[in-house]
Amino acid sequence: MRKKLIAGNWKMNLGPADSAKLAQDILNAASGNDKADIVIAPTYTSLDRVSGIIHGSNVKLSAQDMHWEEQGAFTGKISWDMLKELNVEYAILGHSEQRTFFHETNQTVNMKTKKALEKSLIPIVCVGETLEERESGKTNAVCEDHVRGAFQGISKEDAVKCIIAYEPVWAIGTGKNATPEQAQDVHAFIRNLLKEMYDEGAASTIRILYGGSMKPDNAAGLLSKPDIDGGLIGGASLKADSFLGIINAAP
Ligand code: PGA
């Protein structure tokens, strides 16, 4: 049985003071909650404050990205050891906003995923199609390309440590979520692909989250599907009550 995982991606929202308050509110409400693994991803400047608040609790910390190099002349970038020092355990990699606005490619996602695994950070690898790609029948092909690209050269032993997030680009921040059936279809496709790439054991171990306008009122339907193992939540993770509403919607 794969335990559900609910992750909040705060994106470029909330400075340290507001992040600290939200983290404390989430901790107060979610402390001891065993329905799902709970992860929050504040912006870099808030990681230190939030880390101090949630350290040792069941709420875990994620970064929104990381660089594949260890250190050096990479202005604006963050390395794994800077994250580890703040007790960050997860890293969101290949988010569509990174792909769209910051030249993220399958190759850079792959390099980041390998580095994260080497350093024992858990990668949350994002994949998903645009509206145009969906409408031209390319959804599965795009997801396959993203998954194969991210996992290129990664062993089964490492692959099972990863999490995949299926995030249709047309559903992100639009209020228009994929229906549970649409999402389930793609999740099942990805799981099948993992079976082909690795084996049955790996495919049934790797958690596949859904992301894209997930909210308390649509979460139960999505989370009840057999291949949807949790959610990567943007907008609705910025308020403790809606984030908790999604966690509590987990079956
Ligand atoms: P959204 O974002 O929940 O605001 O649609 C999801 C994401 O981008 O991870």
Image (cartoon, rainbow, N blue to C red):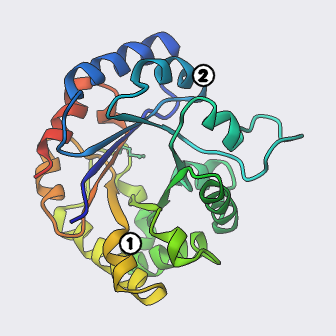
Most extreme residue toward the front is: 56
Instruction: Residue 75: give x, y in percent of width and height.
Output: 82, 36
Q: Residue at x 54, y 33 (%)?
A: 87
The extreme bottom residue here reads 196
| Residue 1, visible in the rendered structure | yes
Specify the farthest residue to the top. 17
Q: Which residue is at 64% across, 52% downward?
A: 119
Asked if 138 appears above or below 94 in the picture, the reply is: below
Q: Residue furthest right?
A: 73
Spatial CA distance of label 2 from label 1 is 36 Å
Q: Is residue 217 left or right of residue 11?
A: left
SS state under label 1: helix
Q: Please rate how many residues cluster around mark 1, counting C-alpha atoms within 10 Å: few if below 14, some from 14 to 19, many from 20.
A: some
Q: Circle 2: is it few (<14), some (14-19), or many (20+) Cα within 10 Å?
A: few
Q: Is residue 14 visible?
A: no
Q: Quadrant of the N terminus?
A: bottom left
Task: Give the quadrant of residue 243.
Answer: top left
Q: Earlier in the sequence, mark 2 or mark 1?
A: 2
Residue shown at 65% from the left, 45% from the top = 66
Residue 148 position in % (x across, y down): 55, 78
Between 23 and 55, the one lying in front of the other is: 55
Residue that carries the numbered disc 1 in the rendered image: 134
Residue 224 % position (x, y): 12, 60
Q: Is residue 179 left or right of residue 42?
A: left
Task: Tell me which image quadrant ligand 1 sits in.
Answer: top left
Secondary structure, mark 2, is: helix
Amino acid at pointer 2: Thr
Nearest the viewer among 240 and 203 is 203
Residue occupied by mark 2: 45
Query: Marks 1 and 2: in contact by CB < 8 Å?
Result: no
